[in-house]
């Protein structure tokens, strides 16, 4: 999927919403709890309910790997379900993988040659060797962690280097040259929205995947105000706020309502800032 | 498994060898190539052949995930096979996971509650939040990437911070306080063995997992000379050099011979430097 494809879907839906499919088997709504097919039934219902308002789905691998081979089968079936029914929606596998050369190439193969996802989140710690194998697949995306939304992002990501820049800025400046705006995105947590204006000085055109809006305290308005590029350039993720909007048999309607509410806010922000 | 358990196995076998089970289905020896059961048959033969000389097995998840749910079943069966037959041998899952809080807790659960591995490799980029959930399991190990053996380790790991230290040293100094020598190890690539003496100033007692000896150019002698602690404190990994020592039906004997050769060299190094 190209950058133009993503932007055209954003314009069509008037939304830059990414729905995080972080499906916790322990939090399934009452009608699905305890059934073996619960996770897939839940995911199908959430996908169908939110697809009109979302331009991206992002399953987090941890939630599937926890259940071993059975969970991985659910992850694959979830990707396949989206691909079959909503081929215009971007699928990002939130795997935060990071290994070297030959090994990284196997992860790339796992996600891209088997056509599970359009992009994968990657950890930059080991440098270019991690990302390069993923960049070889045309139309696929490397989504590189830069500044995350968790409290201990301060431990290393915000550490000042000898020239005064924080580490995450070096990651942006270095990694933007590994690929292009057509195959690389960056993860920038929204809990420090003013930082998005710093980020935009370094990567004015790249798509940014922004977690941390809502549950983690970030503001959607500030994210758009400081982070929107001429082609929007934002994918704002919401997981728990949508998935667990209601724990009764009305969970899918509640998820749709929550996604629709975010879409309406995003429509206004696109009018204001694009 | 405690640090004392690992050291006692090192003394018993006179070895600090870790065999990396990076089994590539495309490189199976002739008699196993193309069979669906090939990977497990290969792993069982390699494990049985090298167990007398090894104190640790380290399957790399990328090699299993590449084949999706079927590959993950092989990963689980491999861990189970080692646990059943060789309970005294440490199992480290080389997964290089790195996520935050609740999500990281799910990865910890995936590897530890299901009793697949004794330890997991982790990426420090997102800070303490990644590692903390893994430290809650008594007798389990967090194996944190510090300085890796790939060329692009220079991109970020070796970058100088404002106070002049390279980033990997800040990782060591920070992460050593998250846990203890009883639940934390660090990955230190052996391609720059003199660096091990710097590392030992910061973490004199911690176990170090050392890749990069052999295929990637590191010297076993230098690793021991600069890196050995009073309780050995080293696990030196070899993968391809052992797994693919021979591509005929004699692959397991060749793997045993290669592992035995490394064990003999390690025995000498333990006599010299312990």
Image (cartoon, coloured by chain):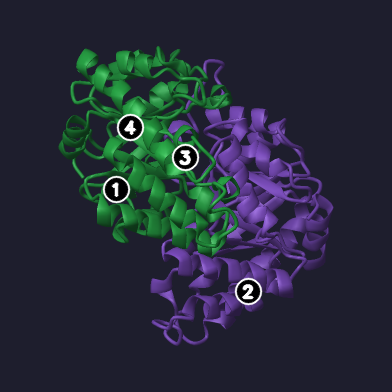
Chain colours: A green, B purple
Viewer-side residue, B7 vs B31: B31
Callouts 4 and 1 close, C-beta under 8 Å: no
Separation (CA) of disc 4 from disc 2: 48 Å
Of the image marks 4 and 3, the number of the one nearer the N terminus: 4
The numbered mark at residue A243 is 3
Judged from the image, the secondary structure of the residue bearing numbered disc 1 is loop
Residue B25 picture location, percent across and down: 42, 72
Q: Quadrant of the N terminus of chain A?
A: top left
B53, above or below B135, in the image = below
Q: Quadrant of the C terminus of chain A?
A: top left
Please determine if labels 1 and 2 lie on a single subunit.
no
Viewer-side residue, B63 vs A264: A264
Residue located beneath label 2 in the image? B47
Please determine if labels 1 and 3 lie on a single subunit.
yes
Judged from the image, the secondary structure of the residue bearing numbered disc 2 is helix
Separation (CA) of disc 4 from disc 1: 16 Å
B94, above or below A179, in the image = below
The numbered mark at residue A17 is 4
Residue B120 picture location, percent across and down: 62, 51
């Amino acid at each position: 999927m190209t950058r133009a494809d993503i932007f055209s879907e954003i314009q069509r839906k008037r939304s830059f919403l990414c729905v995080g499919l972080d499906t916790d088997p322990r939090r399934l709504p009452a009608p699905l709890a305890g059934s073996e097919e619960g996770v897939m039934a839940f995911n199908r219902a959430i996908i169908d309910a939110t697809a009109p308002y979302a331009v991206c789905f992002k399953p987090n691998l941890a939630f599937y790997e926890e259940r071993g081979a059975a969970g991985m089968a659910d992850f694959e079936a979830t990707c396949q379900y989206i691909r079959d029914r909503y081929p215009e929606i971007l699928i990002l596998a939130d795997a935060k993988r990071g290994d070297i050369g030959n090994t990284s190439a196997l992860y790339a193969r796992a996600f891209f040659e088997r056509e599970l996802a359009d992009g994968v989140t990657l950890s930059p710690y080991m440098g270019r060797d991690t990302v390069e194998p993923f960049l070889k697949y045309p139309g696929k995306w490397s989504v590189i962690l830069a500044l995350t939304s968790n409290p201990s992002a301060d431990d290393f990501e915000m550490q000042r280097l000898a020239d005064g820049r924080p580490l995450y800025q070096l990651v942006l400046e270095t990694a933007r040259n590994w690929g292009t705006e057509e195959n690389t995105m960056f993860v920038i947590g929204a809990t420090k929205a003013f930082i998005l204006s710093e980020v935009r000085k370094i990567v004015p055109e790249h798509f940014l995947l922004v977690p941390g809006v809502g549950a983690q305290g970030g503001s959607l308005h500030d994210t758009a105000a400081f982070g929107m590029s001429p082609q929007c350039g934002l994918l704002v993720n919401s997981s728990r706020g949508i998935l667990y909007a209601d724990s009764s048999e009305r969970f899918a309607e509640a998820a749709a309502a929550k996604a629709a509410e975010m879409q309406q806010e995003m429509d206004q922000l696109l009018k204001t800032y694009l």
